[in-house]
Image: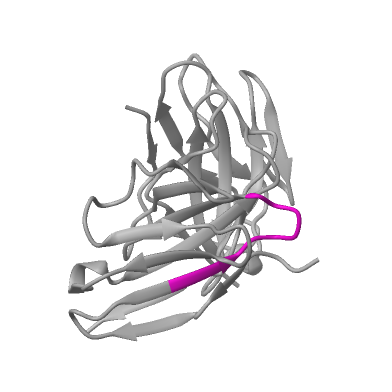
Amino acid sequence: GNSVTQMEGPVTLSEEAFLTINCTYTATGYPSLFWYVQYPGEGLQLLLKATKADDKGSNKGFEATYRKETTSFHLEKGSVQVSDSAVYFCALTEQGAQKLVFGQGTRLTINP
Amino acid sequence: NAGVMQNPRHLVRRRGQEARLRCSPMKGHSHVYWYRQLPEEGLKFMVYLQKENIIDESGMPKERFSAEFPKEGPSILRIQQVVRGDSAAYFCASSEERGHNSPLHFGNGTRLTVT
């Protein structure tokens, strides 16, 4: 079945550091890929998405590129801020479907 | 435009009681999804509903759990005879249409604690 594997956390960085959170997936067909962010006590918010190979999703300084050859969708940000502290979830949907399959989440803490 | 509204935010039940979780989708959204998040884990799909229809319940436990999305009113996730293992955060999401071009909007969740 479809699955998503994320880099294990927690990840702790200093402000302005470079961020990478790894995500790889297993899926049949051509899934759409997503990154969601969850701030403490809140629900998930869509951060960015990519729907086909080589697409790059970007939002709020975060980027991720859909790499079909490596089945990856790594999240990157060039300079993190304290306000980026949250849990980040990589997810996919099967082609034509809406059901999301989530990774286990990566907790990110940014220190001033 | 209000987002997805879930209530209550926190729910405490003793073992054997019933838990009812409510979800009002965003205005104009007719697709509702329920997910469960166990501590320190990702979200797991439970059920997908449209108005008056269950479309996909492949993630629902076979016993004690049920969901509905009536023509009028919120979607309800019902857990009968709760056990400690049901303690989790339950998230509802809604979308306007089916398909990956229609993004899911999540509520803030209901945190169920079974004592």
Q: Position of residue A3 (x, y in %)?
A: 36, 33
Q: How does the figure colour the protein chain or chains?
A: one colour
Front residue of B93 and B30: B30
Q: Is residue B88 left or right of residue A43?
A: left
Determine whether B95 is above or below B112 in the image: above
What residue sits 48% from the left and 62% below the top? B91
Left or right relative to B85: residue A76: right
Give the x, y percent position of residue B45: 40, 48
The residue that appears at 52% across and 72% down in the rendered structure is A40
| Quadrant that contains the N terminus of chain A | top left
Q: Nearer the viewer, residue A15 or A61?
A: A61
Q: Main secondary structure of the magenta part?
A: loop
* Residue B28 location (% of width, % of height): 75, 54
Asked whether residue B109 appears in the rendered view, the answer is no
Q: Nearer the viewer, residue B14 or B10?
A: B14
Q: Tell me if residue A108 can be seen.
A: yes
Number of numbered discs: 0
In the image, residue B2 lies in the stretch drawn in magenta: no
User: Magenta residues, as a range?
Assistant: B21-30
In the picture as drawn, the residue positioned furthest to the right comes out as B1
Q: Quadrant of residue A66?
A: top right
In percent of width and height, residue A79 lies at 67, 53
Q: Residue at x 40, y 44 (%)?
A: A103
- Residue B25 part of the magenta-drawn span: yes
Of the 4 image quadrants, the one containing the C terminus of chain A is: bottom right
